[in-house]
Image (tube, rainbow, N blue to C red):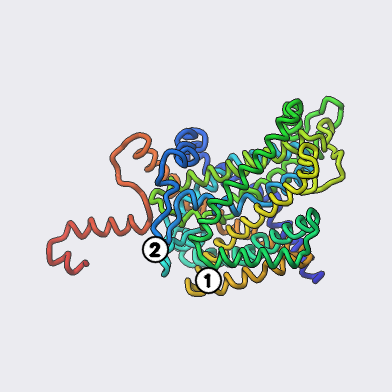
Amino acid sequence: MQLIESINSVVNNFVWGLPMLILLVGTGILMTSLTKFFQVSHFKHWFSNTLGAVFTNKHVTKHTAKDDKQLSQFQSLCTALAATIGTGNIAGVAAALATGGPGSIFWMWIVAFFGMMTNYSENVLGIFYRRKNEKGEWSGGAMYYLQDGLGAKKGCKHIGKTLAVLFSLFCVLASFGIGNMSQVNSIAVNIKSAFGIPYLFTGIVLMLFAALVIVGGLKRIGSVTEKLVPFMAIAYVLGCLIIVIANAGMIVPAFAAIIKGAFGMKAVGGGIVGSGVASAVTWGMKRGVFSNEAGLGSSVMVHSTSNVKEPVMQGMWGIFEVFADTIVVCTLTALSVLCSGVMNLETGEMISSAEKTALVAESFSGTFGVFGRYFIAIAILLFAFSTVLGWSVYGTKAFEYLFGTKSTILYKVFFVAFIIVGATMNLELAWDLSDTFNGLMAIPNLIGVITLSGTVSAITKNYIDRKIKGKDIRPMYSAFETIQKEQEERIDDLDFEEKEEAI
């Protein structure tokens, strides 16, 4: 066991070291440049076609037919947000503040800004290279654009296939860790602390609820998450806003502490905000990546199940996903802590001795009394359980790629059974291992995004020319549809006998 811990520590430090963070942010910078700062230059367009469209376009939220295995755009987003809006938005932000100081939040914003275009690019490639499985469900993700995109390049067939298999393997392993046992353990610990309910009882109840949803398949998961995610996100955001408004006089000092801490400026009182620039940068970037998962190649697997044809349309939902997760939810968590008085904004030192989720719970208790602690315990329950549902989709799609569609029921049974393990065991090593496999997913995925960056750029330009500039040109919907269309056009140029032979 000690040997495993030592090996994992070395690998984890390598995977989540500064070079990896630079690669993640660097990929976001590359895609931002190639798309000419799409997240800023076309802000009105992508926002009106995502959140704005929820209220104005019935096709965005309209459910597909009962026998249709696709998800609506809104269901795809909610299932993706179910996995990303989790304990990282509470415990992760609190850990960043406690270790990296207020300045870490600034660097979390930087990661999110460029991560929007990384997530956008993943979704564009996911839709472009997706395919339908035996059940009629869309299957897409890094494994498919590695195999069919990177693999189609000269001399890269075996490289693409190998990276696709590695990504899928890392995803399956990560789904049991960060997508299951770690989340369930957080729920069990917080429920025991707040309400005194035994771990085993919590595990059994969660396992039963998860089984009802997960074994029911993709559409049942989408149906549950589209109701659960908006409810939990709105309730949590309102709670944070009430704390911030109740301490309105601390809003300006809180933002000042964030900016000063990000660059190591001297505070008014003469101290240094946070624990230094390096710590603020490292913790801000690391927690930002863990929160929105941009670059890991995870959420693209559920975005690819959407009923859209336009790759850019689902890409824009990827931008909104990162915006909602980090810019909105994580920022409000940080402000609720900074404005509540549990941290000295002059020096960046913690006044409270609480850590992680308890730090946020203390912030809520300052405004809501004892109800604040119960509220955070319930929020963690909903956030973490929704993450379990979202990651079950990721693991299922990765398992399907490795072993075929019919084998996925075996994965689902094991995934649900491991909920009991997560609720009843000490999972410090499981947390570390899941972090490692989660990080290892990013390496093949980022290779795919970078090598196919030209494809993302071409698809984006095609969309802008058609939808924004009004040019009459052929759309780029999917690689397989494009190949099929070209074949049909070549056949149209042949005479009757040649057509018959070609068909």
Local packing at callout 1 (Cα closer than 10 Å; few below 14, some 14-19, many 20+) is some
Residue under label 2, please give it.
67
Secondary structure of the residue carrying tag 1 is: helix
The three-letter code of the residue at mark 1 reads Thr
Residue under label 1, please give it.
408
Residue 137 left/right relative to 418: left
Q: Is residue 111 visible?
A: no
Q: Position of residue 266 (x, y in %)?
A: 81, 28
Q: Look at the numbered discs 1 and 2 and tell me whether their residues touch, using CB distance below 8 Å.
A: no
Q: Residue at x 70, y 39 (%)?
A: 105
Q: Position of residue 198 (x, y in %)?
A: 78, 64
Residue 74 left/right relative to 95: left
Local packing at callout 2 (Cα closer than 10 Å; few below 14, some 14-19, many 20+) is few
**Viewer-proximal residue, 41 or 29?**
41
The N terminus: image quadrant: bottom right
Quadrant assignment, res 500: bottom left
Q: Residue at x 72, y 47 (%)?
A: 375
Mark 1 or mark 2: which comes first in sequence? 2
